Image (cartoon, helix red, strand yellow):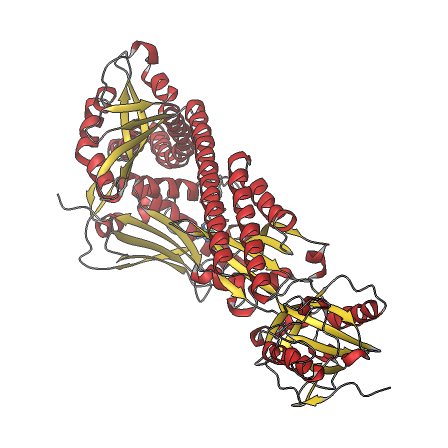
Amino acid sequence: MRESLEQTGGLKVPSRIPLHVRRGRRQKDGEEGPFGPDSEPLEEQRADFYESSPVPQIVCHRSGRVYSLNRAARDLLGRSGSSILGRPLQGFLSRPDGRRFETFLEEVLAGEGGAGLEVRLEAEPSRVQEVALEGSPGGPMGDGEGLVLLAARDVTRQRAAEEIRYRGERALRALNATNQAVRWAPDEGTLLQEICHFLVRGAGYTLAWIGEPAGEDGEPIRVLASADLDGCLERIQDPIAWGFLPHGRGPFGRALETGKPAMVANVAMDPQYDLWGEQAAGQRFRSVLAVPLQDERRVHGVLCIYAEEAAAFDAYELNMLCRLADETANAMASFRAREAQHRAERERDRLLELLNATPDAVAIADPLGEILYANPGAFRMAGRSPSCDSGRAFLGDFLAPVAAERLRREGFPQAREAGLWRGEAALRDAEGQDIPVAMVVVAHKDGAGRVERFSVMAHDLSQFKSQQAELERVRRLVSLGELGSVLAHQLNQPLASAMNFAQGSLRRLEEPDEAGNIRFGLEQVVGYVRQAGEIVWGVRHFLRSGEPKARPMSLNSLIQRLTPDHLQGGMEAARLELDLQAELPQVQADPILLQECLSNLVRNAEEAIAARSAQEALEDKGVVTLRTRRYSRELVEVAVEDEGIGLPEDLREDPVQPLFTTKTGGMGLGISICRSIVESHGGRFWAAPNDPEPGTTFHLALPVCQEP
Ligand code: ADP
């Protein structure tokens, strides 16, 4: 093969100039022009023409190896001839572009290369050049076997402009679709789903989802809507983690935290997202944008959009998507406000149902007491009908005068102060009857702390009061039963004694000179009958009033009077000792009932000692000690301590068990009566084993007499 190329400054010049290059010349076939055959040697002219052509031209071998390239091509690629000559052009292309380029060369050489080819060439300094290639077969200088002449056109700007237009259009289309959806979507869920759907199907993004933080910081996100291309959402194992990443550093987290859009230009390259790089490898997206969905008050969520290209979101597109996000956020806010309003209305309806159904009276009044609302229960309680009440009504009109006064002095001021007042009051119904009620007054205040409304609730206590009275009656009946037993118990002794003395006196009537003894006997009868009369009087009084006839009295004096004579049958098995604290305050008590109580306890103590003596065959008498002491500021205590057998097991937990007795002929009522008596004085009654044992101590504490 003849060497048809000549070296010109390291350049190989093609012998045949392609058509489109020739078109730039004014020369036509058969015509003489400035490059005419006689003016210069043809080869040189060609070389000059090739080298100085403004059209970048590259000559390649069939394999793609670069044979030559002119200045314009060197400029286009920003490379020197030596850095590219002899190297395959595919090395400057992406792999898919490289394969397409090889096919293209084959087609050109086969005469089918009419179509051009667009590729992205790596140029210096590191940039990418979008180039449109047109190829024609032909060896240089008339011997172009296996060579292809490529005329290159820089289409970078054109493509960039198209890209911008495309991106602008897709974002604009998405914005329009959002505007439409805001108008027709019936609820938030449908709207968000529609937006995601359109971003992917209509605007061509790879994946779009909207999420909101489900809990505290670091908690998972709740996805509100999502759409993806080719099921890519499924291929992402954990899309949420991608958006959030630890410590809120993913775009979702950043957008949420800052309230500003957050972007990742290339997930595969971003060093901050190693995690992403790994997982993003098989995905159809390179860049991510997270835009906060916020109105003036708060961030409702974040819209995450994934695009196939790296650095997909330019300023214009970002602007459009931010507007889309704002539209969405406003729509979300109004959906949520509407939902909140519906909820509030439902709550209000439920509350109204409740107010209508409750038998309690509920009223709302302004700060002056004028009633603004009253529920049916209030009308029912007041015995009025809502229809016949017209004109202004005040709370005071429905209250008994005393209750109205109490509310005025105490209820409203305290509610104003503390927000709430509770107390008893009385309503006055249409017929002038007073209804006892438990009342609650609540003050509702405005932002400045001024009372706007009072709510007043009243619960009818009539039934409760009558139940209470019934209870009191039952309690008295129980006491009556107990006191009946006391009577039987206590009257037994004076009546038996009176009987003895009366019979003795009768017997002596038959005998002479017995007038003195008969007198003594009859005096004893009178004394015992009087004692019985006093007991009956005390009990009658207790039954009548329900309360003992209490008066200030000294416990020490009462105890000192309580000699064995006052105790039934005297004290045979035990010795009585007194341990009385000096200068005790007086107590408020009924001396007769108290005496009965103490007699009972001392008698039990003695019997316990007797039982122990019998059991343990003791020779000495046991001791019963009566002590007094100041128990607390309010109470004075009497303790009856014995050295007896101790409480039976059944009474150890609770010594007050009516009708429980361990004695033959016992009634098991003494202790319950003692407790009734002490408690009816407002005192306390209890018992405990001695520590150390043996024996038991019964305690009663009575209220100190209040200074007048
Ligand atoms: P009664 O004396 O008629 O049995 P009480 O109610 O006075 O009725 O006493 C009930 C029971 O409590 C007695 O049978 C006795 O077993 C026990 N008890 C009362 N006082 C004492 C005491 N000081 N020591 C031991 N047991 C007692």
The residue drawn where x is 45% and y is 49% is: 326
Q: Position of residue 60 (x, y in %)?
A: 76, 78
Indicate the quadrant where residue 110 lies: bottom right
Total numbered circles: 0
Query: For residue 670, which quarter of the picture?
Result: top left
Q: Is residue 315 visible?
A: yes
Camera-nearest residue between 386 and 185:
185
Residue depicted at x 57% and y 51%: 170
Q: Is residue 230 above or below residue 76?
A: above
Is the C terminus in the top left, top right, bottom left or bottom right quadrant?
A: top left
Q: Where's residue 638, x and y in %?
A: 31, 53
Left or right of 666? Residue 129 is right
Residue 177 position in % (x across, y down): 55, 42
Q: Nearer the viewer, residue 542 or 7?
A: 7
Residue 534 in view in this figure: no
Side (left or right) of 357 relative to 703: right
Look at the picture and state if 560 lies above or below 666.
below
List the single residue furthest toward the top: 388
Given residues 169 and 228, the one toward you in this image is: 169
Q: Quadrant of residue 575?
A: bottom left
Left or right: 228 as drawn, with respect to 399: right
Q: Image point 46% across, 55% down: which residue?
A: 319
Q: Where the N terminus falls, by quadrant?
A: bottom right
Coordinates of residue 64 in the picture (x, y in percent)? 78, 78
Q: Nearer the viewer, residue 189 or 556?
A: 189
Q: Is residue 659 above or below residue 704?
A: above
